[in-house]
Amino acid sequence: MAPNGADARRGMVYLVGAGPGDPGLITVRGRDLLASCDAVVYDALANPTLMVGLEAECYDVGKRGGSTDSARQEEISELLVRLAREGKSVVRLKGGDPFVFGRGSEEAQALAAAGIPFEVVPGITAGIAAPAYAGIPVTHRGLSTSVTFVTGHEDPTKGAPTVDWSALARSGSTLVLYMGVRSLPRIVEDLRAANLPDDTPAAAVQWGTHAAQRTIVATLATLEQCVKQAGLAAPVIFVIGEVVSLRDEIAWFERRALSGWRVLVTRAQSPASTLARSLAEAGAEVVDVPATRIEAIDMGRLRAAISHLDAYDWIAFTSQNGVEHFWRVLHDCGLDTRALASLRVVGVGPATADALLVHGISVDVTPKRFVAEGVLEALAQREDVQGTRVLYVAAEGARDVLRNGLVKLGARVDVVPIYRSVPDDEAAEAMRAFASDAGERSLVAFTSASAVRAYVDGVGRDLAARVGVASIGPTTSAAARHAGLDVRVEAAQSTIPALVAAIVSYGTSQPYDRLR
């Protein structure tokens, strides 16, 4: 840390390790600092999802080996000093750990020289995490009692190589190589020249801890050729040593149900949505790009209905969004849950029922099928619907199925639209990129017909049709088929858990060598 006497008007810089790629591996301290800082200066290897939703200024400085777009180290240090001198709290977010081949110590030196206070927040380094996710422990009793981390990209200003490969070959230590793709032929040659046996187990782990992780197992003699054949490019961690032989036994990450799958999630929620999170936990590479956003509409009709709630016998909600928008207006009118005390309540599905329960309302009717048709089936079994008046809180453009069915059951229905789903124009480019790169193990997941329409409008029919569809239910499936899309998966019930289960079932039914 800088001396306690540093100018109190100056800001603070936090050198934070972002971890190796999996956003869940950042430390609690690091995540808290990201949520509260004024500015983030981040590397290319820091997972971009860590920046989603931040209110801070964000500066991308690249720092990918060989990239011409990366900022020079001196420019990065100058940026940190400038932001701090503006009084900002700055997170310098670095892939892995700041002090393990991350040049974080050089940035700390620059900050100290400028009198800027700083803190170092360690991160999980790729040299430990990538092998662990590949099922390769870097030490194991009886196989290796030490591990050596080595960079394959030495400082060119130092002239002759400083790594004594001969000594490393004799040590019996597990060797973990960073940034070694370009230098691999020379490193292998040096180790073989130092009499490290050709049949020594070796592995290459590309994009370690990411959903796109790939692991190649070879021997010292075949490693270079295997890497070429697989087309591996940076970032890659190499592991050389007997511990690699344990992979067949304890590999876990690439054995997850959706390993190797890419899924575009179009749900209009935050990146931390249940759907995206559940698919990622099952092993999928999730591209979370909400195709639509929820927009409130003129609430005049809803306010008028709320002012005469005593005129209604039933109130029907068909989504969580409807519940939340209704309650916001209810509170604006100076009312609370007690205003619904005399009403019977319908909720389409458990998610809507749960949203109502948060506000203290237990639904009177929850259908077996979580669609409008299921609601009507449930209400048709009751004797307290005919002759009643129903307030139907709906999305703009909602199907007429529920309204028409209630009328047939003898009810008078007032449909009050309170929100609409509108295309998110900023999402179109990301959706097109996904569709363009989609392969056989790609799906786009839809939870509403409006998301289908927004996706097709944003991507174009021809490109959209290249990707298989996972649908939350029959209404959404019908919209997808009408648009010419290939519906490969449909949830047994119209819920997020059922959709996840259906995608997992489909994914595991497709032949795939998970350990490649």
Image (cartoon, grey):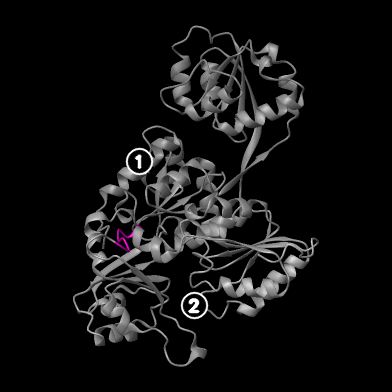
Disc 2, disc 1: CB below 8 Å? Answer: no
Q: How far is mark 2 from mark 1, CA to CA?
A: 40 Å
> What residue is shown at x 42% (from left), y 42% (from top)?
471
Identify the mark nearer the N-term, 2 or 1.
Answer: 2
Tell us which disc is closer to us: 2 or 1.
2
501 or 68: which is nearer to us?
A: 68
What's the amino acid at mark 2?
A: Gly
| Residue in the image at 24% along x and 77% along y | 220
Tell me if residue 297 can be seen: yes
Q: Which residue is mark 1?
A: 502
Residue 65 is marked as 2
Can residue 482 be seen from the camera position used here?
A: no
Q: Tag 1: residue type?
A: Ala
Q: Quadrant of residue 2?
A: bottom right
266 in the magenta segment? no
- Name which residue lies at 66% across and 27% down: 326
Residue 28 or residue 387, whichever sits in front? 28
> 295 or 16: nearer the eye?
16
